[in-house]
Image (spheres, rainbow, N blue to C red):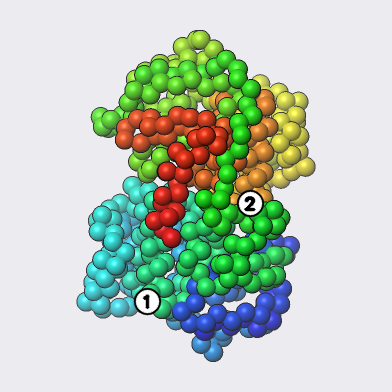
Amino acid sequence: MIQFHQVSFTYQESPQKGGLHKIDLTIQDGECVLLCGRSGCGKTTLTRLVNGLIPAFYPGELSGSVTIDGAVVQDCPMYHLAEIVGSVFQNPRSQFFNVDTDSEMVFGMENLSWSKERMKERLETAIQDLQIENLVGRGIFELSGGEKQKVAFASIYAMSPNIYLLDEPSSNLDVDAIEDLHKTLTLLKRQGKTILIAEHRLYYLRDIVDRIFYMEDGGIRQSFTPAELGEIPEETRHSMGLRAIDLSQVRTPEPTQVQVPPVLEIRNLSLSYQKRSILSGISLQAAPGEIIGIIGHNGAGKSTFSRALCGLHKETTGTFYWKGKMLSAKERLKHSYMVMQEVGYQLFADSVEKECCFGIRHPDKEAARQAMEQLGIWPFRDFHPNTLSGGQKQRVAVAVSMVCQRDILIFDEPTSGLDYDSMAQVSQLFQTLASMGKVIFVVTHDYEFLTAACSRVLHLDNGGVVGDYAISPENEGKLQEFFLQKQEAAT
């Protein structure tokens, strides 16, 4: 049993962000509990109090008590907590200590000084129960995001803790990996484990969780059963900053884009990697203002196609045209700009204003100012980019593309880990860019965002384009065939 009694916490370095205020909560053994609410509401902070990261790793002012089976968490040695509480973070790479999967999966057991025989037995059980035989003997850096999470999960599962903490576990996963995550959570629940999940995506959990706590401003404001949460009107749910409960209820809008002549044309594009064919025979046209969602299963070639658009993929045949002029790979680099999923990797300057002009030989500072104002980041012009939120960093990267006068923008999973409010802001950002005549490509596994932001879908699978159509009520069934069949299988 986990008990919070009048718990309040304030972070030492960020007193105004993510704290908790007088939390009273009891989680029974074997319960699966979901924490939801806007980013910064305190979900992650609450989980850190259970695994001891607060105050051991995150210092601050703590009052009240957190107990597990009557033992005060703050008084428990970390090695003891590690045996009873397992944590899977939003980014599994942050909890890796080895370069191969086998060593990583036994790392926790080694630190608990288990015998070789016991470690071998538990490792074999974890591999069999989680069905990850294909991940044995692999290099960590060659794994996909979903595979990395499975390895992180296996390293915790092998130690067989009674309590599992998951922080935004689906944020970087595609539809197949979310289905696998659902199966794993179902397995843990059958085993009677206590599960605490902080999450924005809610739909895949509705048949697993027992109770749902809505958090706001560091407090628990409401408690729901899954059925009660599903009965909340959509408008009310959106006002709470919550994502969809049932993807089948998400409707595709009527198309509003005015037909204009295409500016980008791709003819007979084929892509290979290490002499292995990835995609072939791709031909398409795109008009200014189009927002094209790129979907497909893991390994379908979405990232390879994105790199080819930017002129960054070498094993490329076919031709690209911009306004009728054929573009070389070097010229495509000058026309395009990619905003990566982890956008912090492409920000280098020590202020937002300097970032907007970074690496540009003769920067137009007035254009930089206008871009920042248009994207709502002018008030943060003197801030270091790494102090901004994920959405604000994204806007900084977009501002750079505007100052560089790039016409083709490519976004890789721009809504991973975002609540409804932030997702809506990204959608509005795309509409703003579309109104400027940009051609936008978006790699995404987010059905809710796809229907809200994109005007068209490019479906890559089986080595080519298996679908290219406008997002509209008439084509809703095609989208649902890809996304919702996985949802139904998971639930």
State the image coordinates of residue 256 (x, y, percent, origin top left).
64, 29
State the image coordinates of residue 179 (x, y, percent, origin top left).
40, 56
N-terminal label among 1 and 2: 1
> Crowdedness of circle 1 by 10 Å Cα count: few (<14), some, many (20+)?
few
Q: Is residue 426 above or below residue 207?
A: above
Residue drawn 47% across the image and 17% down it: 265
> Residue flagged by tag 1: what amino acid is it?
Gln
Q: Is residue 54 left or right of residue 137?
A: right
Q: Is residue 413 above or below residue 488?
A: above
Secondary structure beneath label 1:
loop
Q: Name the residue under label 2.
A: 420
Residue drawn 67% across the image and 25% down it: 436
Q: Name the residue under label 1.
A: 191
Secondary structure beneath label 2:
helix
> Crowdedness of circle 2 by 10 Å Cα count: few (<14), some, many (20+)?
many
Q: In this view, does 59 lie to the left or right of 413?
A: right
- 236 or 115: which is nearer to us? 236
Q: Is residue 436 left or right of residue 92?
A: right
- 313 or 229: which is nearer to us? 229
